[in-house]
Image: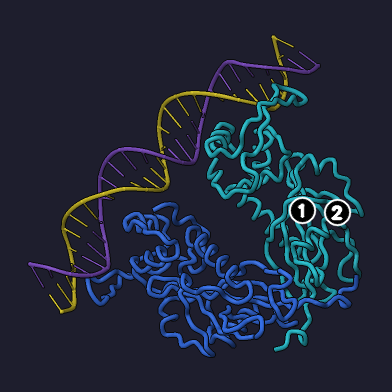
Chain colours: A cyan, B blue, C purple, D yellow
DNA sequence: GCAAAAGTGTTGGATATACACCCATGT
DNA sequence: ACATGGGTGTATATCCAACACTTTTGC
């Protein structure tokens, strides 16, 4: 019954870092090669949790150390504890979802072999990381429809068309432009900045920003 | 970087076992007394995760060993990893929600000092267990409205009034009887068994059962 | 016949959906 | 002037919320 006699678990975090790039959800993966079990595979960034830090701390630290990412949004997904999920031994992992705004993801130079992969084409990942990515996408989809989490996928200012494309690419279905705008304005989740943005071609678009400063739990979408 | 040199974490599970008794949500608590930090407090049942079992396995085992409960529904809530959440040392806990149907909860004789406590009157619990209970209630509320999880709070057969009382006691607001029935029937989540049940007084009620056999992810309620 | 709980429909309002054209810009 | 993407309103269908009385039983 004394905990100190029963120390056994290796606790890790794995982070599904998601960004929307070119209208497709991408995930940040790092190559792993640990023969004989794992050969030339891709895995989520992550690592061990230290005795003196929380899981959240570990996420922040590993994102900084391994990915060079700071200040990005993250939330806990679930804990994966299958006994043989890691061939090296018993590792229990707390999975997180992290989001990177598209402009940051574009300018970002990932260190150490890290690369953005379109989620649809990512294929089989190491460990149980496909499961984690599935959970991350599912959570992101649910939260897009019920919260203002999209703010963390966008630049500070953005056009409503940009925002709609983010929604469409994550939800995987087209949305009606007029209804989309109507709902966002009615719920006061975005506000016009008055500024305009000229894209490569076509009429300039008005720039918006999210109204609050946090992720709020407001219904945003239901159908088209 | 070798995991085996970094074994440190004590991994535990804590289970918020919830049942509705007399129209009020109750939680199963056990007394803990670990001076000087924890004196005559109440805590959720739970315990360590063994090296050869998953967190889910540990939940099933501890529910059986410590509570004498078998076969009840459980789902993972979240993982709590604050550094000083346990005064005895570093313990990371995966929290679960478990549900017990009211008739079972009534006939159940809890062993070892365990007792049902009305959640509203539970007061301050040991460790971070108030947080876990809050998360459990929140999850239960959300799932009642979007899934058929209520099946695990009910006997196999039940009256719609019973079911409505469960909803009302968890959501904390009255529901309209006609609208409630209409929605359940329209969504085909419950079906009449044809049988009747005579309660102590008043007109006998028709007995229903849940239609599917699993928890399904269907919108059930929105407003009254 | 009275107390207690079960059961049953309708209506008005709000919300969601479907849909097509004009506008501002660069080339 | 044309190609490209941005921006706007209305009509219909659906869904949700509010609401009160009758039925069956035990006492």
Q: Is residue A202 above or below residue A116?
A: above
> Which of marks 1 and 2 precedes in the sequence?
1
Residue B5, x across and y down, in percent:
89, 77
Q: Residue under mark 2: which chain is it in?
A: A
**Placement of the C terminus of chain A among the 4 image quadrants:** top right
State the residue at coordinates (67%, 76%): B55
Of residues B142 and A211, which is closer to you in this image?
A211
Residue found at x 68% / y 30%: A207
Question: Pointer 1 indicates a residue of which chain?
Answer: A
Dot 2 corresponds to which residue? A67
Both labels 2 and 1 in a single chain? yes
Q: Residue at x 30, y 73 (%)?
A: B195
Answer whether residue B82 is visible to the viewer in this image. yes
In the figure, is residue A54 to the left or right of B46?
A: right
Q: Nearer the viewer, residue A53 or B50?
A: A53
Vertical arrangement, residue A139 with respect to residue B77, above or below: above
Task: Identify the residue position indicated by label 1 in the image.
Answer: A17
Query: Mark 1 falls on what kind of element?
Result: strand
Q: Which mark is residue B141?
A: none
């Amino acid at each position: 019954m004394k905990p100190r006699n029963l120390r056994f678990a290796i606790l890790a975090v794995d982070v599904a870092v998601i960004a929307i790039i070119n209208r497709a959800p991408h995930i940040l993966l790092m190559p792993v090669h640990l023969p004989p079990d794992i050969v030339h595979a891709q895995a989520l960034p992550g690592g061990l949790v230290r005795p003196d830090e929380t899981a959240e701390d570990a996420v922040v630290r590993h994102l900084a150390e391994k990915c060079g990412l700071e200040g990005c949004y993250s939330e806990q997904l679930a804990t994966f504890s299958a006994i043989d999920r890691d061939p090296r031994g018993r590792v229990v992992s707390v999975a997180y979802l992290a989001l990177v705004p598209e402009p940051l993801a574009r300018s970002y130079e990932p260190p150490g072999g890290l690369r953005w992969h379109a989620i649809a084409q990512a294929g089989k990942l190491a460990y149980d990381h496909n499961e984690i990515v599935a959970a991350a996408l599912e959570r992101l989809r649910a939260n897009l429809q019920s919260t203002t989490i999209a703010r963390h996928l966008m630049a500070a200012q953005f056009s409503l068309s940009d925002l709609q494309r983010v929604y469409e690419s994550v939800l995987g279905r087209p949305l009606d432009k007029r209804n989309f705008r109507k709902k966002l304005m009615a719920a006061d989740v975005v506000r016009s900045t008055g500024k305009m943005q000229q894209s490569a071609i076509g009429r300039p678009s008005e720039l918006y920003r999210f109204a609050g400063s946090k992720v709020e739990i407001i219904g945003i979408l239901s159908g088209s």
